[in-house]
């Protein structure tokens, strides 16, 4: 049986990517730093997924795991695998880069050929980030043997309460950069090859992730804990759907080839958020506010994209304002510090239209 390495056995690693690899006929080797999880996967060689919207349970079998702290063991698996997937969160990529480099060196030494790395992270331009991390560790010739394949993770997997069962929605779609593979593209279920891929990354980040964060911050300000509870509040739902419409219009104009699919995508996202069985939390979705308000991330990036395409991001600005208020509440800062904080987080000047719109929206939110 052919082997695929899944770097990260967390919510996405097991809840989406690992399951797709197993469905496609690969033996899945998880790499993780949690000893109990590694031991459990090696004992059972399986795990359970529960699809909350279908009330359906499946068993993912044919898996094993290695300790992510053991570089020799990880490198040996990478050297033998068909390809590698990563799902470790963007901030942890620097920690795994030396392990990936060691695996590639061992792979080339045994004549196993190029290595494709499917980057399954919520990160714009993730291939560029991986290039920055791997280039100092590899020679130019070795770098030519790495295919850095961007993907977009389009499944909502909330925080888990049972370590033995991954609870998730059943929505299943894994777009991949069709131009980035070295050699034949490996067959993986429920994937789609996209070219140019940047259109797909923008659509997911500036629509689903943007709307998710908007809902989370507005829900937090209203004192609700769960995303479905927030979506049940009419003003929040109206803002979320309005923000999606603004972003969809901009992306459709920028990428006409995916215009129809983009508008369809905007229609199904609110239904996914509102699913009460998913019980995703505003705290999880809204975590790491500074990153989510940064210039090229989901909120500020989406608003700037709408402006660049000739639109007006009124509803997205409300999401930015809500995120700012949540940030102020967490830091205990005074409301008067908001303009400077917005400039700091967004890297935009104070007179930028997005800043002006967000501050105007914040004034209305602060009075509620």
Image (cartoon, rainbow, N blue to C red):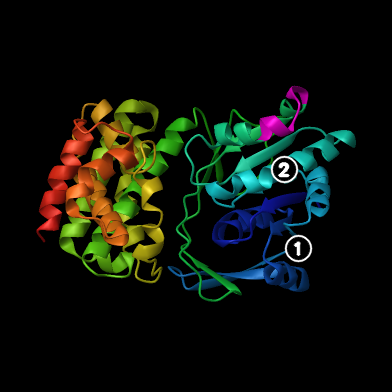
Q: Nearer the viewer, mark 1 or mark 2?
A: 2
Residue at image position (36%, 57%) is 286
Question: x%, y% of residue 12?
Answer: 55, 57
Q: Residue furthest top?
A: 140
**Which quarter of the rendered picture does the C terminus lie within?**
bottom left
Circle 2 residue: 98
Query: Is residue 95 shown above or below 29?
Result: above
Circle 1 residue: 64
Q: Mark 1: give few (<14), some (14-19) or many (20+) Cα within 10 Å.
A: many
Residue 141 in view:
yes
| Magenta residues, dominant SS class | helix
Residue at image position (59%, 28%) is 179
Q: Nearer the viewer, residue 331 or 102?
A: 331
Identify the mark nearer the N-term, 1 or 2. Answer: 1
Secondary structure, mark 2, is: helix
The quadrant in which residue 329 appears is bottom left
Q: Mark 2: give few (<14), some (14-19) or many (20+) Cα within 10 Å.
A: some
Which numbered marker is on residue 176? Answer: none
Question: x%, y% of residue 128?
Answer: 56, 31
Q: Which residues are magenta?
A: 134-141
Question: x%, y% of residue 266?
Answer: 31, 46
Query: Is residue 315 shown above or below 301?
Result: below
Residue at image position (57%, 73%) is 165
The quadrant in which residue 251 appears is top left
Q: Nearer the viewer, residue 72 or 265?
A: 72
Residue 2 in view:
no
Question: x%, y% of residue 133?
Answer: 63, 36
Residue 293 in the magenta stretch? The answer is no
Q: Is residue 286 left or right of residue 157?
A: left
Residue at image position (74%, 36%) is 115
């Amino acid at each position: 049986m052919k082997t695929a390495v899944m770097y990260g056995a967390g919510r996405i690693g097991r809840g989406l990517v690992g399951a797709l690899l197993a469905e496609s006929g690969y033996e899945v080797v998880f790499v993780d730093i949690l000893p109990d999880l590694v031991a459990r996967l090696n004992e059972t060689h399986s795990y359970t997924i529960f699809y909350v919207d279908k009330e359906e349970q499946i068993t993912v079998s044919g898996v094993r795991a290695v300790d992510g702290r053991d570089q020799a063991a990880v490198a040996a698996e990478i050297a033998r695998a068909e390809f590698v997937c990563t799902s470790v969160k963007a901030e942890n990529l620097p920690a795994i880069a030396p392990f990936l480099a060691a695996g590639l060196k061992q792979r080339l030494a045994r004549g196993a050929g190029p290595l494709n790395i499917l980057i399954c992270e919520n990160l714009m331009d993730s291939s560029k980030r991986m290039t920055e991390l791997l280039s100092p560790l590899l020679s130019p010739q070795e770098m030519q043997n790495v295919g850095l394949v961007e993907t977009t993770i389009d499944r909502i997997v909330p925080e888990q309460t049972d370590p033995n069962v991954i609870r998730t929605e059943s929505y299943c779609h894994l777009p991949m950069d069709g131009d980035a593979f070295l050699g034949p593209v490996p067959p993986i279920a429920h994937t789609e090859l996209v070219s140019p891929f940047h259109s797909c990354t923008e659509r997911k980040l500036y629509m689903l992730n943007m709307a998710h964060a908007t809902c989370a911050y507005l829900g937090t300000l209203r004192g609700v804990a769960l995303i479905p509870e927030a979506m049940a509040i009419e003003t929040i739902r109206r803002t979320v759907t309005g923000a999606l419409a603004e972003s969809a219009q901009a992306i459709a104009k920028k990428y006409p080839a995916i215009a129809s699919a983009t508008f369809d995508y905007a229609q199904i996202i609110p239904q996914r958020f509102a699913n009460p069985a998913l019980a995703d939390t505003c705290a999880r979705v809204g975590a790491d506010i500074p990153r989510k308000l940064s210039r090229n991330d989901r909120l500020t990036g989406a608003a700037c994209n709408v402006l660049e395409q000739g639109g007006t991001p009124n509803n997205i600005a409300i999401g930015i304002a809500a995120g700012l208020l949540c940030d102020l509440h967490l830091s205990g800062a005074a409301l008067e510090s908001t303009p400077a904080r917005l400039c700091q987080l967004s890297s935009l000047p104070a007179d930028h239209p997005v800043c002006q719109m967000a501050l105007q929206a914040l004034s209305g939110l602060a009075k509620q």
